[in-house]
Structure formats: structure tokens, C-alpha cells
Image (spheres, helix red, strand yellow):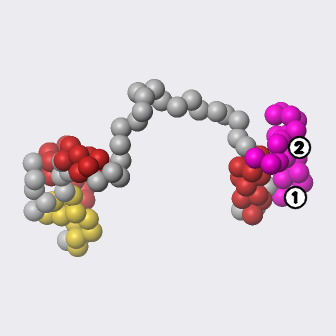
Amino acid sequence: MEVGASELRANLRDWLERAREGDEVVVTERGIPVARLLGIDAAPLLDRLTAEGLIGRPATAERPAVSSRMAYPEVRAALAAAHRNHDLDGDGLAQAEASWAEFWGQPDRSS
């Protein structure tokens, strides 16, 4: 079945339910098909990926801790990218590197 993009936006919940029930919904803009909406039955997909060894359950239910401290190579790469994108000029790059080093202490350049 087909649905116009504006109708889809206006009644998204109804169209998602149709796709969930197995209908294929073709989204059109000015009568031209631009996308296809299909339901996904996630449980069999996850079971198949697990059986194929592509995914697995985590060893523990705990989420890993997140560290706000970035390793020196990651920081340097981020600053270099900002410099390449012209978000930082040469002076700004030097200042950012100095600020980072001052805040965290001398970076371990071997990591």
C-alpha cells in the first residue's frame, strides 16, 4: 500500500502499526515512491544473530564505566580535525593543546 509523506507524518502511529502487522508501506512524495516501511520482528533476528555468533549477551549486566579523560592520541586527533576544518587556527590549536595539557597534566604521548 502507498502513503504520501504528509499523510505518513500526520498519522505515523497508524502507519507504523500497519507495518508492524506485516503490511509493506511505500512512502511517496508527489506520487513518486521514495521509501519503504516494513515491520521488523526483532526477536527472531536477535536469536539468529546469536546462533551465528555475531552477537552475544554481555558477561555482566553492568554497564561499563565511562571515562571523561581522553587518551592523548584521541585528543590530538580531535584538535587536528578541528584545525583542518578551520574551526581552530594555528594559535587556537596551540592554545587548546596547552589548555588540555594543563588541565590533565602532561599527557602520556605513548598511549
Q: Position of residue 6 (x, y in %)?
A: 24, 56
Q: Which residue is located at x 25 percent, y 59 percent?
A: 5
Distance (Cα) linking label 1 and label 2: 12 Å
In this view, which residue lies farthest toward the top? 62
**Residue 13 disc label:** none
Nearer-the-camera pick, 61 or 96: 61
Queried whether the magenta region covers residue 100, the answer comes back as yes
**Residue 10 in sight:** no
What's the magenta region? 89-111
**Residue 105 in sight:** yes
Q: Position of residue 64 (x, y in %)?
A: 52, 31
Majority SS type along the magenta span: helix
Tell me the mark number nearer the camera, choosing from 1 and 2. 2
Nearer-the-camera pick, 72 or 8: 72
Above or below: residue 79 compared with residue 99: below
Q: Is residue 1 left or right of residue 103?
A: left
Q: Which residue is located at x 10 percent, y 56 percent?
A: 23
Mark 2 lies on a secondary structure that is: helix
**Residue 90 disc label:** 1
Say if mark 1 contacts mark 2, CB within 8 Å: no
Residue labelled with disc 2: 98
Q: Amino acid at mark 2?
A: Ala
Q: Amino acid at mark 1?
A: Gly
**Label 2: how many Cα within 10 Å (few below 14, some 14–19, many 20+):** few
Q: Position of residue 1 (x, y in %)?
A: 10, 62
Q: Which residue is located at x 45 percent, y 26 percent?
A: 62
Nearer-the-camera pick, 12 or 85: 85
User: Counting residues from the N terminus, which is met first, the one under dot 1 or under dot 2?
Assistant: 1
Q: Is residue 76 left or right of residue 18?
A: right
Q: Which residue is located at x 71 percent, y 62 percent?
A: 85
Q: Position of residue 55 (x, y in %)?
A: 35, 47
